[in-house]
Image (cartoon, rainbow, N blue to C red):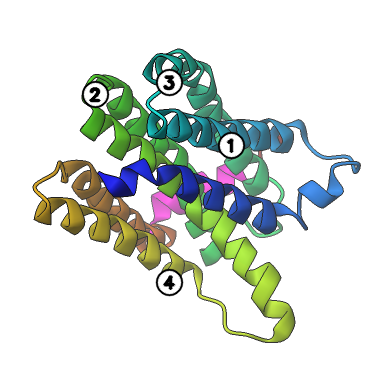
């Protein structure tokens, strides 16, 4: 359980990654006009990460009553993460020049998958809120959902200016899958609940497959083209 007791530090690291990653494209441009969905999604995303930091600190310091009280805020924040995540995905699809480009359609799928996976993990975390082992694992996995959007940008912002190698999007997706599998094997070897990580890993593997395959689907092509006509 030490890994989860130290989750406080991992959540702070995630916050730093998000700030570094989104600094050039968002945080440094807050005085410029932006679509409202970008602000709402950023607020929801940061609120969730800050909630994870606070909750992991409270658990680490055995402040269980405060942890339960603050946890009620998740009932408001989690739906905002999901709704704004889907909204911002449609918004970006409506702004691109070629909504049928292969990479655009792949990212469009990824933009749907993340909030839906987050919703599933959150529901499971609430469902198992009286089981500390399961609840903690599902909540940590919600943080893993946020990793790629921040890490990919953070690496590009810090390494690309020096001409250093940066991983591809698929490689980052593989990294996320690797972390989930490592967490699963670690818990399996310690005879701790490992099925939350198994569920995450299976869904993430499906996500990678659909990221590659969906742009070749005529049905997805039509849906992507339709979404590209929207102004939301």
Give above or below for 55 relative to 186.
above
Question: Residue 131's image quarter?
Answer: top left
How crowded pointer 2 is (Cα within 10 Å; few <14, some 14-19, many 20+) is rated as some
> Which numbered dot is residue 106?
none
The Cα–Cα distance between marks 3 and 4, rounded to whole angstroms, is 36 Å
Dot 2 or dot 1: first in sequence order is: 1
Q: Earlier in the sequence, mark 2 or mark 4?
A: 2
* Tag 1 residue: 45
Q: Main SS of the magenta segment?
A: helix
Quarter of the picture containing the C terminus is top right
Tag 3: Cα neighbours inside 10 Å, few (<14), some, or many (≥20)? some
**Image depth: mark 2 or mark 3 in front:** 3
Query: Mark 4 or 1, which is nearer the eye?
Result: 1
Find the magenta span and give its range. 217-228
Q: Secondary structure at mark 4?
A: helix
Residue 148 is a magenta residue: no
Say whether disc 3 or disc 4 marks the residue closer to the N-terminus: 3
Could you tell me residue 55's position as x and y percent? 46, 29
The answer to whether residue 181 shows anywhere in this view is: yes
Would you say residue 87 is visible in this rendering?
A: no
Q: Which residue is mark 3?
A: 67
Q: Nearer the viewer, mark 3 or mark 4?
A: 3
Q: Which residue is mark 2?
A: 128
Q: CA distance from mark 2 to mark 3?
A: 15 Å
Q: Quadrant of the N terminus?
A: top left
Task: Confirm or deny contact between disc 2 and disc 4 (CB under 8 A).
Answer: no
Across and down, in percent, residue 37 comes to: 70, 33
Residue 124 image offset from top left, x and y in percent: 28, 28
Q: Which residue is mark 4?
A: 171
User: Seen from this angle, which residue lies furthest front?
Assistant: 61
């Amino acid at each position: 359980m030490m890994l989860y007791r130290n989750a406080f530090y991992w959540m702070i690291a995630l916050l730093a990654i998000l700030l570094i990653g989104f600094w050039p494209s968002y945080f440094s441009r807050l005085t410029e006009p932006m679509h409202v969905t970008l602000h709402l999604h950023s607020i929801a995303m940061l609120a969730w990460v800050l909630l994870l930091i606070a909750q992991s600190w409270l658990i680490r310091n055995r402040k269980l009553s405060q942890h339960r009280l603050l946890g009620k805020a998740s009932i408001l924040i989690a739906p905002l993460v999901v709704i704004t995540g889907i909204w911002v995905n449609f918004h970006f699809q409506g702004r691109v020049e070629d909504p049928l480009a292969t990479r655009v359609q792949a990212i469009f799928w990824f933009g749907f998958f993340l909030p839906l996976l987050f919703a599933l993990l959150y529901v499971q975390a609430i469902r198992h809120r009286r089981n500390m082992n399961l609840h903690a694992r599902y909540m940590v996995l919600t943080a893993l959902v946020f990793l790629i959007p921040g890490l990919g940008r953070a690496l590009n912002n810090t390494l690309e200016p020096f001409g250093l190698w940066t991983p591809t999007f698929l490689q980052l997706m593989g990294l996320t899958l690797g972390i989930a599998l490592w967490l699963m094997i670690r818990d399996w070897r310690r005879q701790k609940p490992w099925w939350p990580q198994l569920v995450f890993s299976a869904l993430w593997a499906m996500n990678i497959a659909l990221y590659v395959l969906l742009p070749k689907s005529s049905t997805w092509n039509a849906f992507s083209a339709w979404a590209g006509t929207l102004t939301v």
